[in-house]
Image (tube, rainbow, N blue to C red):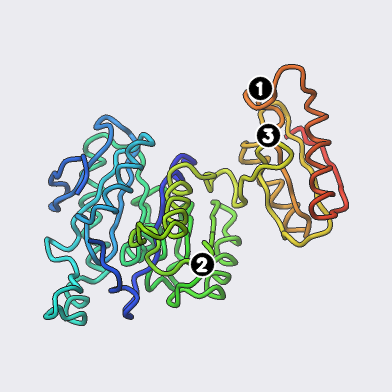
Amino acid sequence: MSSFYLFILFILFLSSSECFGNPPTYGAGTVQELGGLKAYVRGPSDSKLAVLLISDIYGYEVPKFRKIADKVAAAGFLAVVPDFFYGDPANSSDPHFNTEPWLKNHTTDKGYEDAKPVIAALRSKGVSAIGAAGFCWGGKVAVKLAGSVDIQAAVLLHPGLVNEDDINKVKVPIAILAAELDQALPAEQLTDFEEILSAKAEFDSLVKIYPGVAHGFTVRYNDEDKFAVKSAKEAHKDMCFGNPPTYGAGTVQELGGLKAYVRGPSNSKLAVLLISDIYGYEVPKFRKIANKVAAAGFFAVVPDISSFENVKPGINPLFLSQNIAQKLRNTNKWQRKRTKSNV
């Protein structure tokens, strides 16, 4: 199921003005009917892996949202974007638009129930595993699905109205991609979410905060703002090509010329370099060992030394590990501890 964290999950449905600000001003897929809903569909029709993308309040026709679906499809998934609002998305540019009755008519509870027939329809077409990526309003729907057996993984991107009870009910690998300046999902609440998820040893999770961006940053960014575009693209990349949560809740960084799985307190003065067996640095059980090392207060570093794609002919892997250790000392003045594993 690790491949499902190639999705992207998008943040927050706010009942405040943030949720209705900067509405996005259609895609190369097709519109089909699935489970009683119209849906924008793109990707290999024979794929056994599908991603259900659940929009914010502006609906399934928004160009930038459909482009995200196109990226998911390009990664090999069948991307499905249902119209949960039945042709009635929010329209904050309309002076007669009334927020309160619209929200009452389009609840996330109804979105959750409407998603089930769509999932059933995908199953009937031979799809064996389904992930959900929810943006803003859709984040609440996606986290509800993550508390069921209907999907195999979930990503929440700046989700709205998500609470601790929702997180406590999560049963599948999940990632939360959040905005630093999102008033509806403050950092302390994200910390609480991370603690709850970290205690669920049966699956992996990820909470990532993107600096300097606000609610809706993945779908409502200003094309003229280079930083906003870069942040959105980073989140899109994390969703489609990022480190799969089923392979660990840390991050993949470059250290000493190699990719490395990293987890633990960034301000720690003690680092542990874990060197894998021949099966490499992505093995789930090996990364779980790194997570335990990090939980003990160390900065755990798992370099991809054993990959012949990354190790050039004539370069000794021991030299590469020494290079990483030296970089850790030079940049952060960490004391070093090294361990080997035969996991």
Relative horizontal placement of residue 328, taking residue 165 as reference (left or right): right
Disc nearest the viewer among 1 and 2: 2
Residue 299, given in percent of the width and then of the height, sits at 76, 54
Residue 8 or residue 123, whichever sits in front:
8
Which residue type carries mark 1? Phe
How far, Cα to Cα, is label 3 from label 2?
Answer: 31 Å
- Name the residue tied to disc 3: 304
Q: Nearer the viewer, residue 145 or 91?
A: 91
- Cα separation, mark 1 vs mark 2, equals 38 Å
Disc 3, SS: loop
Residue at 66 percent across and 44 percent down: it is 261
- For the C terminus, the image quarter is top right
Q: Which residue is mark 1?
A: 308
Q: Residues within 10 Å of mark 3 (few under 14, many from 20)?
A: many
Q: Amino acid at mark 2?
A: Gly
Q: What label does residue 37 carry, if any?
A: none
Under mark 3, the amino acid is Asp
Compared to residue 52, the image places residue 143 above or below, namely below
The local secondary structure at tag 1 comes to: loop
Q: Is residue 133 above or below residue 105?
A: above
**Residue 16 x/y as whole percent:** 33, 80
Label 2 element class: loop
Marks 1/3: CA–CA distance: 9 Å
Seen at 48% across and 72% down, the residue is 181
Q: Quadrant of residue 165?
A: bottom left
Q: Is residue 28 left or right of residue 282?
A: left
Q: Does any portion of residue 147 appear in the rendered image?
A: no
Judge the density around disc 2: few (<14), some (14-19), many (≥20) Cα neighbours within 10 Å. Answer: few
Numbered label attached to residue 212: 2
